[in-house]
Amino acid sequence: MAIRTARVLQSSKKLLKSLSHSSNNVDIPKGHLAVYVGERMQKRRFMVPVTYLSHPSFQKLLRKAEEEFGFEHPMGGLTIPCTEQIFIDLASRLSTSS
Protein backbone atom coordinates (compact mmCIF):
# COMPACT_ATOMS: atom_id res chain seq x y z
CA MET A 1 0.00 0.00 0.00
CA ALA A 2 2.78 2.45 0.93
CA ILE A 3 4.67 1.64 -2.27
CA ARG A 4 1.61 2.30 -4.42
CA THR A 5 0.92 5.58 -2.61
CA ALA A 6 4.50 6.69 -3.23
CA ARG A 7 4.17 5.91 -6.95
CA VAL A 8 0.89 7.81 -7.20
CA LEU A 9 2.45 10.77 -5.43
CA GLN A 10 5.49 10.68 -7.73
CA SER A 11 3.27 10.47 -10.83
CA SER A 12 1.16 13.38 -9.59
CA LYS A 13 4.25 15.52 -9.07
CA LYS A 14 5.45 14.76 -12.61
CA LEU A 15 2.03 15.63 -14.02
CA LEU A 16 1.88 18.91 -12.11
CA LYS A 17 5.38 19.78 -13.26
CA SER A 18 4.52 19.11 -16.90
CA LEU A 19 1.30 21.13 -16.65
CA SER A 20 3.10 24.06 -15.06
CA HIS A 21 5.60 24.10 -17.93
CA SER A 22 2.91 23.82 -20.58
CA SER A 23 0.96 26.98 -19.84
CA ASN A 24 1.26 27.90 -23.52
CA ASN A 25 -0.70 24.83 -24.58
CA VAL A 26 -3.81 26.92 -25.27
CA ASP A 27 -2.24 28.25 -28.46
CA ILE A 28 -1.55 24.81 -29.92
CA PRO A 29 -3.89 24.15 -32.85
CA LYS A 30 -6.02 21.03 -32.77
CA GLY A 31 -4.20 18.10 -34.36
CA HIS A 32 -0.75 19.52 -33.55
CA LEU A 33 1.80 19.20 -30.78
CA ALA A 34 4.51 21.51 -29.57
CA VAL A 35 8.12 20.39 -29.73
CA TYR A 36 11.26 22.18 -28.65
CA VAL A 37 14.16 21.97 -31.06
CA GLY A 38 17.77 22.99 -30.75
CA GLU A 39 21.06 22.14 -29.20
CA ARG A 40 22.34 23.18 -25.82
CA MET A 41 20.34 25.86 -24.01
CA GLN A 42 18.89 27.57 -27.09
CA LYS A 43 15.59 25.88 -27.93
CA ARG A 44 12.88 27.03 -30.33
CA ARG A 45 9.26 25.94 -30.13
CA PHE A 46 7.60 24.45 -33.22
CA MET A 47 4.05 23.24 -33.84
CA VAL A 48 3.94 19.99 -35.78
CA PRO A 49 0.95 18.01 -37.04
CA VAL A 50 0.38 14.78 -35.13
CA THR A 51 0.52 12.97 -38.49
CA TYR A 52 4.30 13.45 -38.40
CA LEU A 53 4.48 10.99 -35.49
CA SER A 54 3.93 8.05 -37.82
CA HIS A 55 6.62 9.06 -40.32
CA PRO A 56 9.86 7.02 -40.04
CA SER A 57 12.13 10.10 -40.26
CA PHE A 58 10.28 11.81 -37.42
CA GLN A 59 10.27 8.60 -35.39
CA LYS A 60 14.06 8.52 -35.73
CA LEU A 61 14.20 11.95 -34.06
CA LEU A 62 11.84 10.73 -31.34
CA ARG A 63 14.13 7.77 -30.61
CA LYS A 64 17.07 10.16 -30.42
CA ALA A 65 15.11 12.29 -27.93
CA GLU A 66 14.27 9.22 -25.86
CA GLU A 67 17.93 8.15 -25.78
CA GLU A 68 19.09 11.59 -24.69
CA PHE A 69 16.33 12.65 -22.31
CA GLY A 70 14.25 9.57 -21.50
CA PHE A 71 10.91 10.91 -20.33
CA GLU A 72 12.34 13.89 -18.41
CA HIS A 73 12.50 16.65 -20.99
CA PRO A 74 14.22 19.85 -19.79
CA MET A 75 11.68 22.21 -21.36
CA GLY A 76 8.72 20.43 -19.81
CA GLY A 77 7.61 19.31 -23.26
CA LEU A 78 8.94 17.12 -26.02
CA THR A 79 12.51 18.20 -26.80
CA ILE A 80 14.13 17.13 -30.07
CA PRO A 81 17.96 17.14 -29.88
CA CYS A 82 18.94 18.35 -33.34
CA THR A 83 19.73 21.64 -35.00
CA GLU A 84 16.87 23.90 -36.02
CA GLN A 85 17.96 23.66 -39.66
CA ILE A 86 17.80 19.86 -39.69
CA PHE A 87 14.34 19.98 -38.13
CA ILE A 88 13.09 22.65 -40.55
CA ASP A 89 14.39 20.64 -43.52
CA LEU A 90 12.64 17.50 -42.26
CA ALA A 91 9.39 19.37 -41.59
CA SER A 92 9.52 20.83 -45.10
CA ARG A 93 9.92 17.39 -46.64
CA LEU A 94 7.11 15.97 -44.52
CA SER A 95 4.72 18.82 -45.30
CA THR A 96 5.22 18.45 -49.06
CA SER A 97 4.77 14.67 -48.91
CA SER A 98 1.43 14.91 -47.06
Image (spheres, rainbow, N blue to C red):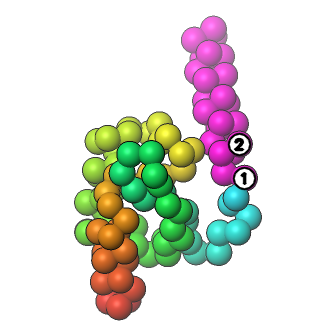
Q: Name the one closer to the observer, 23 or 83.
A: 83
- Residue 5 counted in the magenta span: yes
Q: Is residue 64 left or right of residue 32?
A: left
Q: Residue at x 66, y 51 (%)?
A: 22
Count of number-bearing discs:
2
Against 2, residue 93 (above or below) is: below
Q: Amino acid at mark 1?
A: Ser
Kindly state the secondary structure of the residue where label 1 is placed: helix
Q: Which residue is tagged 1?
A: 23
Is there a contact, CB below 8 Å, between mark 2 and mark 1? yes
Q: Given the current orientation, which residue lies at the most extreme top position? A: 2
**Circle 1 crowding by C-alpha within 10 Å: few under 14, some 14–19, many from 20:** few
Instruction: Residue 87 in the image: state x and y as whole percent.
Output: 34, 68
Give the percent coordinates (x, y) of residue 93. Answer: 30, 83
Q: Measured from the top left, where is residue 27 in percent x and y?
A: 70, 69
Q: Position of residue 73 (x, y in %)?
A: 47, 42
Q: Residue at x 57, y 44 (%)?
A: 76
Quick check: 78 left or right of 31?
left
What residue type is disc 2 on? Answer: Ser
- The residue stretch that appears in magenta: 1-23
Question: Residue, x 32% and y 89% (percent of image)?
Answer: 97
**In the figure, is residue 36 to the left or right of 31?**
left
Residue 20 circle label: 2
Dot 2: few (<14), some (14–19), or many (≥20) neighbours within 10 Å? few
Quarter holding the C terminus is: bottom left
- The residue lying toward the viewer, choosing from 29 and 4, is 29
Most frequent secondary structure within the magenta stretch: helix
Quarter of the image where one finds residue 25: bottom right
